[in-house]
Amino acid sequence: MKNLLTNPRVLRSWLGISLMGVLLGGCSLPIKPQQAQNTYRLNPPALQTGAITVPGETQPAAYLIEMRPITAAQGFETPAMMYSREALMLLPYRDSRWLAAPAALLTDAVEQTLGRQPWVAGVVSNSARAPVAVSVSCNLTRLEHDINGETGHAHLVMSCLWLTPTTRGVLAHWRFDQTQVMPENDAAQFAAASQELVNQALTQIVEKTRELLVAPRSVS
């Protein structure tokens, strides 16, 4: 046996067989599949408000609206779905996320909701050289899943300013701070509860915008 192992040809054959056995044995080991990533989004609500009529005009009025991209507070500027079991502590879901950062999803939802209204001629993100009637600027403070024992709720906090496009004077200020109870503490229920809050918030944003456009001082 000793003479066989010292033979270079026999030694190479023996090492090849041993290596193949190791590789085949490794292939038989169980491989844990990667956890699927669940992705959720925030959609615009199905909201339709009445047209705006101007005395002396035969056609309903339609205004150009400036909607600046919504900014987000620290901790909510990524697609992570955040939850909290303790005060002052936020953690991201491991296997679930938003399709994009919540502020971007909200910006898109507000633009679409405004754009569907009969009194909106269009929505732009920059008022430069555009005959904009009013400018809307919003900030997302929090969108999180708060857990307290076996119960939980979604919490949405955001605020908006309505500005005159020429002087940037403040026409109105609005703040939304509401919660929505969740039947179960999981990402799917958090997404559903968040959507309910978004529907409420965007309805108020649209109604406030319309209210300011009806007032003579809001048109510049």
Image (spheres, rainbow, N blue to C red):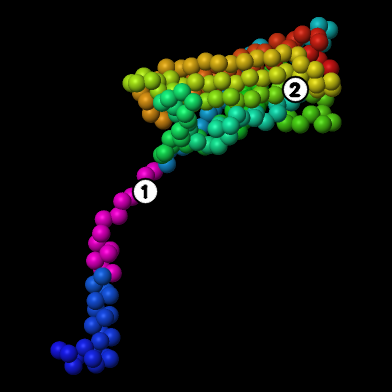
Identify which residue is drawn at 82% across, 31% down: 128
Q: Quadrant of the N terminus?
A: bottom left
Question: Which disc number belongs to residue 135?
Answer: 2
Stretch of the chain drawn in magenta: 23-36
Residue 6: where, in percent of width, then height? 23, 91
Q: Quadrant of residue 219?
A: top right
Q: Are marks 1 and 2 in contact (CB under 8 Å)?
A: no
Corner quadrant of residue 60: top right
Q: Position of residue 121 (x, y in %)?
A: 74, 23
At label 2, which amino acid type do we have? Ser
User: Closer to the camera, 155 or 193?
Assistant: 155
Total marks drawn?
2
- Look at mark 1 in the image and give the residue it sits on: 34
Q: Is residue 31 magenta?
A: yes
Task: Answer left or right for 35 relative to 63.
Answer: left
Indicate the secondary structure of the residue bearing disc 2.
strand
Is residue 108 located in the magenta-colored stretch of the structure? no
Q: Which residue is painted at 47% across and 29% down in the image?
A: 89
